[in-house]
């Protein structure tokens, strides 16, 4: 099934290279727009389950004892 689809795609690409280029360009613009809205966080606690009480306690401890966290966290609190 997959090989059949790939062969058809290759045939279409060979027969209509400019159309294929246009499709790829449109898909790149479409997905590039949504890629700009992605958010990346570097907190270890973001990997923990959000509704768990242990996660809430961990976040309270991190917020309460800022001296134990990284300098980046202190800089973020200044803004």
Image (cartoon, rainbow, N blue to C red):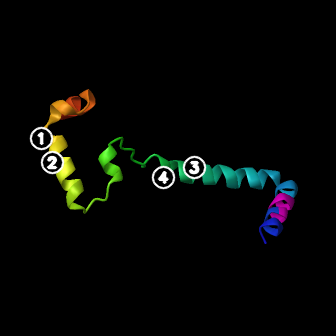
Dot placed on the residue nearer the N-terminal end, 1 or 4: 4
Magenta span of residues: 7-12
Count up the numbered dots.
4
The percent position of residue 3, horizontal first and vertical second, equals 82, 65
- Quick one: which residue is furthest to the bottom in this view? 1
Q: Which residue lies at the image location 19% right of the left edge and 55% below the top edge? A: 56
- Residue 66 drawn at (x, y percent): 16, 34
| Front disc: 4 or 2 | 2
As for residue 62 lying within the magenta part, the answer is no
1 and 2 marks in contact (CB < 8 Å):
yes
Cα distance in 3D space between marks 1 and 3: 43 Å
Secondary element at tag 3: helix
Q: In this view, does 34 lie to the left or right of 65?
A: right
Residue 42 or residue 31, whichever sits in front: 42
Q: Which residue is drawn at 24% across and 62% down?
A: 52
Mark 4 sits on what residue?
Answer: 34
Q: In which quarter of the image is residue 40?
A: top left
Q: In this view, does 15 lie above or below 35?
A: below
Mark 2 or 3, which is nearer the eye?
Answer: 2
Secondary structure category for the residue under label 1: helix
Q: Which numbered disc covers residue 29? A: 3
Q: Assign a secondary structure to mark 4.
A: helix
Q: Main secondary structure of the magenta part?
A: helix
Please tell me which of labels 2 and 3 falls first in the chain: 3
Residue wearing tag 1 = 64
* x and y percentages locating residue 67 in the rendered image: 16, 30
Q: Name the residue under label 2.
A: 60
Q: Nearer the viewer's eye, disc 3 or disc 4?
A: 4
- Is residue 2 positioned above or below 77 on the image? below
Residues marked 2 and 3 touching at CB (< 8 Å): no
């Amino acid at each position: 099934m997959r090989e059949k689809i790939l062969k058809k795609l290759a045939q279409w690409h060979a027969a209509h290279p400019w159309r294929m280029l246009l499709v790829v360009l449109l898909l790149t613009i479409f997905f590039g727009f949504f890629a700009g809205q992605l958010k990346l966080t570097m907190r270890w606690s973001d990997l923990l389950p959000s509704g768990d009480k242990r996660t809430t306690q961990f976040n309270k401890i991190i917020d309460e004892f800022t001296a134990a966290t990284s300098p980046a966290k202190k800089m973020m609190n200044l803004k």
